[in-house]
Amino acid sequence: MKQLTLSELKALSLEILEDFDSFCRSRNIRYSLGYGTLLGAVRHKGFIPWDDDIDVMMFREDYERFRAEYTSERFRFIDHTVIPDCWINFGRVCDTERTVALSTIPWHGPSCRTGVWIDIFPVDKVPEEDAFNDLFFSLYMMHKNAVRCRRVHADPKDCPSLLTKVKVAVHTRLHPTFTKIDPSRFIRARESAIRYFSNVDSGIYSQIACTDYSKPECFTARQLSEYIEYDFEGRRFWGWKDYDAILKVMYGEYMKLPPENKRKPLQNYIRFCWK
């Protein structure tokens, strides 16, 4: 199989985003460009030059509507409620016809085969008090264990290189217990924790479906209250208006370019190939 070039990967990801945007507009479902995609829209009017993926964020109620109603002739929405052996707590709109993804950290089992995708992250209410730190750490540990479990379930033929085959083999030897655990176990536990706190009386929101304990990201209801359109690769997509406050929470000095040795695609553990 021939691997997609970075420009081909960006072009197909943009096609998926356009399909997603068109559907959301037709149903009045709110969304915002997120993470590096929002940063790219603000700083580059499109993709960050070395970036290779697209992220969007949605309030939980919009996410629930989207996954219940989304239809497309070209792409498919997948999360753990759609396929039983999906090992992530957020969603993805995927190409399943033209491309295939080979990964050392698989995110679903053998029930389906996916290619290029965009990530759809739900945003939930979280407690304002210190109890959130305990919740966040618990979610982080579930995420860490789920990733370990997924890595040891990787198919050797999906590893992009001999070096990654060796890394997966070593990881499997170091964590033999995880070879016997269904990764869905961690996903179900994580989902229960998220649901438990999602109805709290709070004005604080966070993306806790995929966590990194080193950088909890909390936003006020006011910061996420208004939407505007952003230019992105010559198209117009929705995003939260208060990008300055949001990007400072996510990246700090977001207009400052990272060192050259840090300008690498984040999905370097995945190889996207044409079928």
Image (tube, helix red, strand yellow):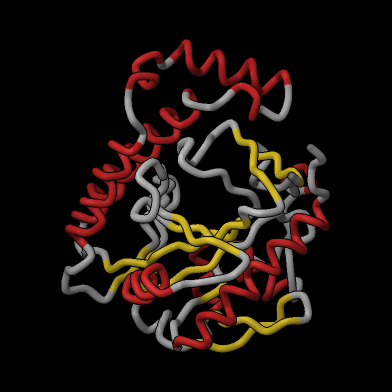
140 left or right, relative to 10: left
Q: Residue at x 39, y 41 (%)?
A: 85
Where is residue 136? Give x, y as percent.
Answer: 30, 50
In the rendered image, the vertical position of residue 59 relative to residue 78, given as above or below: below
- Decide which of 239, 151 is in the foreground and name it: 151
- Left or right, 56 with respect to 52, comes to left
* Residue beneath the point at 36% across and 70% down: 68
Location of residue 165 by image quarter: top right
The answer to which image quadrant residue 206 occupies is bottom left
Question: From this viewpoint, is residue 251 visible?
Answer: no
Rendered location of residue 82, percent (x, y) = 38, 55
Q: Residue at x 47, y 69 (%)?
A: 57
Q: Quadrant of the C terminus?
A: top right
Residue at the image point whose x is 39% and y is 45% from the top: 213
Does residue 114 sit above or below 18 in this rendering?
above
Q: Quadrant of residue 253?
A: bottom right
Residue 222 in view? yes
Which quarter of the figure is the N terminus placed in? top right
**How far across and down, in percent of the image, does residue 175 sit?**
41, 16
- Viewer-closest of 73 and 240: 73
Q: Position of 65 compared to 147: left or right? A: left
| Up/down of 4 relative to 104, above or below | below
Location of residue 2 in the rendering, given as x and y in whole percent from the top left corner: 82, 40
- With respect to residue 10, does 239 lie above or below? below
- Please give the count of numbered marks on the rendered protein: 0
